[in-house]
Amino acid sequence: MTSVDETRREVREGASGPLLTMEGIRKTFGSVLALDGVDLTVGRSEVHGLLGGNGAGKTTLMNVLYGLYRPDSGSVVLDGSPVDIRDPRDAISHGIGMVHQNFLQVDTYTVTENVVLGTSLPSWPSLDLDDPAERIAELSKRFGLTVDPHAKVATLSVGLRQRVEILKALYRGAKVLVLDEPTTNLTPQEVDSLFGSLRAIVDEGMSVVFITHKIRETMAVCDALTVMRDGKRVGTVRRADTSASELATLMVGDDAAVGRVTEVVTAGMGAAAGTAATGAPARDLGDAPVRVSVRDLVVLGDHGVPATHGVSFDIRRGEVVGIAGVAGNGQVELAEAVAGVRALEKGAVEVDGEPLAGRPTAVWLESGVAYVPEDRHRDGILPSASIMENLVLGAQRSVRFRKGPFVDWKAARRHAEEAIRAYSVKASGPSAPAAALSGGNMQRVILARAFSHRPGFLILHNPTRGLDIPSTQFVYDRVREAAAEHSAVLLMSEDLDELTHLCDRVLVLYSGRIVGERTRGHYDQYELGHLMAGLEDTA
Amino acid sequence: MNEATSFLQLVVTAMVPFILAAQGTMIAGRAGVFNVAQEGLMMLGASVGFLVSLKMGGNLVGLLVAALVGAAFGWFLGWVTTRFRLDQFVIGLALFFAATGIASLLYKVVIGVTLKPPLIDTLPDLEIPLLSSIPVVGTVLFTQDVMVYFAFLVSGLLYWMLYRTNLGLKLRSVGENPKAADSLGVSVARTRIWCSTAGGALMALAGAYLPMTYTGTYTEGIVAGRGWLAIALAFFGGWRPQYILAGSAFFAGMEVLALRVQVGGVDIPHQFISMLPYAATLLVMMFALRWASVPAFLGRNYDRESRH
């Protein structure tokens, strides 16, 4: 195994020219063309951004580099010599390391065990993990990736688990380190610390490929970047020679389209410029009455342990309230509880003055509660049912879709055709199975269902996760529309930019408690990050 | 030898099939392959072990051939569930039926229908020098046949391999998070196939032991549900070799006790005692969640290019 030091020497003494070149990479999944002859050139000692909306093919390209996907055609040249990467083992031996968006870790293992997994270590008379642990501690120190080598990874925060992933690659002597959307679920403070580590890594002669859909992140950390769209490379630029608006145009395609989706690509740009407060000034809700009232909510998690400890908040008519927090602090349980999907252990939920706790789901639905769950494949849709059936689901009792004791399928079909048109769902028709839809189109169907009964209380949990730019813009427009029609909106998101951009008020959830609140006009991402990390509110 | 000592000695003998079949289940399961063909593989092991011993004159040859046949079945399960990603449970059940059928068929083809079934020698006791002269313990643990020592040795080796070697670290990761293992260059398919092969061999050995220690011959009902109990035992022991070893003492104890009650005319239905291992397993599953940790990917196939 090559150590980091050898890598450093090799890279410095090696031939000049780019460290990594990928040429004409093409990959299809069934009939879907995911990569259409993509080129990528990464120089030495640089952080190279791979920028694009969801579905642009960034992750697929890197999965090809890491040997997880076999390309249909194309070639990879590393350090001047062509390489054939058949599986991750080849990738690792060629000095490629990858930090996946969903960390690939064994929860029941310690940090050290996760790092050494797959390397050759002597086992007689028994596996010695002391030396590796020492080396991990040394690498941690050198690159600012502090973590206890003996801790079980299941007990670590997202930020620390990410450090483990980076250490895994460094321990194996990676020359090229790929990070897939590494800032998801990090607080702004953790993002700064990550960027510091990336600089330390490239300063030692390695290169980093940084996958992101956020322009502001590429501007903050990248030396050069490649923009992808629809499985194609649309441009490669040096950061010094480009601007956020040029990148936005490259990401979206044409200038006219940029206008329509501009807020998606530029959300959070204010923070990049270094200004503390972001977003528009506070919206005047006048004396709008309280629509949703949540009091002292205690909800049990899947293991029977309380996941929220007395959460209380009000949402007024037309108000958009955000919940910020690192995933796993009670978001899922809170969302499901206020949506009526999960039983309340204690506390009350009222919509328009009507108490809903303990009542059947039908009553929740009638009082105007609409829920867009985080995991749309699992909780949002019946994959083998048709789009039409999915759209009627939950409203099957309403007079609109009833004909005596039966469902009025003619009315349902009319409704579905209308929704498909109004929500620009790309599908062959109302009878197409929901499973055939792409993520963005599936989310449009779920939104159409949520909106079809004029929701009084709309709960959205990570509604734009995995969506391409136009679909994300579509979600933003619908959120505003709901607020304009006096709905109370609860938006839970892992994207702080999205929250500060859309919400009138942001509550921070930590360990099942609301630990702080900021209103529009007073948003400071670092302050929010401070709260998200469980530190005391100093403001 | 007093009553208690001979009871314990019988219990240790009865532990062997449980230990071997459950450790076989465990080793395949820790890599993610959930074999449910134990009952059938034990029948096949009993049949093959008996027939080979009879015809080739030697218990050890019989054990060896039985292990090879079991290994072939285990290999097949591992291969089709990794190479073609067929459903583990469906294939496991198919293998159960196939093995059960082949076991009876082999016996009928080779022996036919006889009034007086042919017998093989049962395994002789091997007294371990010095240790066997310790009172009680010497009789219970060190005056036993070779397979008793083998079963304990296998348990110890499995424990060492799983928790003290690099191989074990890789093996367990394949059952816990195959994607993580794969991304670090650990071959999921190869690991699973090898573990399933070893598991199959152990299961067949468990079966082959039965005619060589109890009956001296093969009968259709020889396994009597011990294979199914081995699955329960794997769960009962939290998929850990050391607890499976301990649990097999309890399972075997209940088996011998049920037999004693039946013979001795005590006023407890023996079915009640035979049920206790199942009841205990249920209780462990319900109340000792942490202890009864199940490999996260047990029974689930892995597809590298799956997009979810």
Image (cartoon, coloured by chain):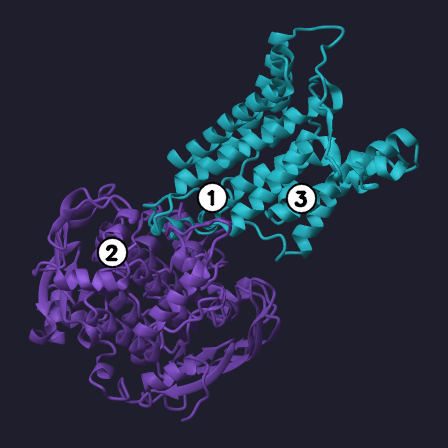
Chain colours: A purple, B cyan
Please say whether residue A202 is visible from this viewpoint. yes
Kindly report which numbered mark, 1 or 3, lies closer to the viewer in this rendering.
3
Q: Which residue is drawn at 55% across and 30% down?
A: B201
- The part of the image, by quadrant, that contains residue B214 is top right
- The first of marks 1 and 3 along the sequence is 3
Q: Which residue is drawn at 24% across and 73% down?
A: A200
Q: Name the residue under label 1.
A: B300
Q: Which mark is residue A96?
A: 2
Q: Mark 2 lies on which chain?
A: A
Q: Residue at x 51, y 68 (%)?
A: A333
Label 1 Cα crowd, 10 Å radius (few <14 / some 14-19 / many 20+): some
Q: Residue A417 carries which label?
A: none
Q: Mark 3 points at which residue?
A: B245
Residue at the limit of the structure toward the front, as seen here:
B130
Q: Which residue is drawn at 72% across and 34% down?
A: B128
Q: Is the residue A69 above or below the residue A264 in the image?
A: above
Amino acid type, residue under disc 3 in the picture: Leu
Q: Nearer the viewer, residue A256 or A94?
A: A94
- Judge left or right: residue A259 versus residue B5: left
Kindly report which numbered mark, 1 or 2, lies closer to the viewer in this rendering.
2
Tags 1 and 2 both on a single chain: no
Where does residue B77 sit, x and y in percent of width and height?
48, 31
Residue at the limit of the structure toward the bottom, as seen here:
A539
Q: Nearer the viewer, residue A191 or B213?
A: B213
- The secondary element bearing badge 2 is classed as strand
Q: Is the residue A516 above or below the residue A53 in the image?
A: below
